[in-house]
Amino acid sequence: MSGANTFIQRLLPKDKRFFPLFDEFGTTVREASGLYYQLLKTTDLAQRKGIVDQIAVHESQGDKLIHKIITELTATFITPFDREDIHRLASTLDAILDDLLAASRRIVMYRIESIPSHLVELGRCVAENGKLSAECLHILKNIKDPRNFAERIRAIQANKSQADDTFLDGMAGLYNNGGNDSMDVLKLREIYLASDDAMRNYQELSFALEAILIKTT
């Protein structure tokens, strides 16, 4: 979008129906992220199954929300910010939920008995970014304090950097520990990768929020 078009868009009345949808999306992602962290800390196999079922409900809700957002996007002439940014935001939120469900299902299906501490720490980073993202999406409709909004975005990115170190240390531990069974290594590797995918999508979400902040303030 050109500078002139952006200026004109700011003067025109905006359709604000997207904001409640993104607010709900943020809550959905926050809840799923918190449940994933809880799952990683739970040793009871039956309780794990129940937690995964809850994550699946949130993932299904995310599918409904992205469908609603895309439908509104095709039907709305004046959007509150660029269409590309709306689509990017919704797609990334949906991807985070997909990643969390993929990782959590593997924990149950592969009958993982012992969760490595590095994987638990990755879950903590996921949960923290879930909270920060929900806060950003809640105040997206009225960014009164751009500096505070930007600080939340930077916190998401800082958690991603910390998660990168945790991920690499955890993977190194898998490969370098000669006592690990080869099948266990393969199973845990998939869970590490899915968790890392979630964190990479949180980083992508922070970039989308950053773009919106720059264009609207």
Image (cartoon, helix red, strand yellow):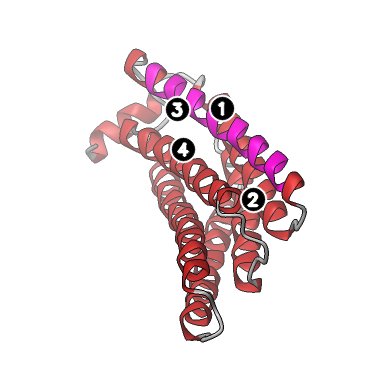
Q: Residue at x 65, y 66 (%)?
A: 115
Q: Residue at x 43, y 22 (%)?
A: 67
Q: Which residue is mark 1?
A: 61
Q: Which residue is mark 2?
A: 36
In the image: residue 90, left or right of residue 177:
left
Residue 164 appears in the rendering = yes
Q: Residue at x 52, y 41 (%)?
A: 97
Q: Name the kind of residue labelled 3 in the image.
A: Ile
- The picture places residue 190, in percent across and down from the top left corner, at 46, 60
Q: Secondary structure at mark 4?
A: helix
Of marks 1 and 3, which one's residue comes earlier in the chain?
A: 1
Crowd around label 3: few <14 · some 14–19 · many ≥20 (10 Å): many
- The picture places residue 108, in percent across and down from the top left corner, at 61, 49
Crowd around label 1: few <14 · some 14–19 · many ≥20 (10 Å): some
Q: Which residue is mark 3?
A: 66
Q: Which residue is mark 4?
A: 94
> What is the magenta range?
48-71
Residue 138 appears in the rendering = no
Q: Are marks 3 and 4 in contact (CB under 8 Å)?
A: yes
Q: How many numbered marks, from 0 up?
A: 4
Q: Secondary structure at mark 1?
A: helix
Report the mark closest to the observer, 1 or 3: 1
In the image: residue 1, left or right of residue 154:
left
Q: Name the kind of residue labelled 1 in the image.
A: Gln
Of marks 2 and 3, which one's residue comes earlier in the chain?
A: 2
Of marks 2 and 1, which one's residue comes earlier in the chain?
A: 2
Q: Secondary structure at mark 3?
A: helix
Determine the CA span between mark 2 and mark 1.
16 Å
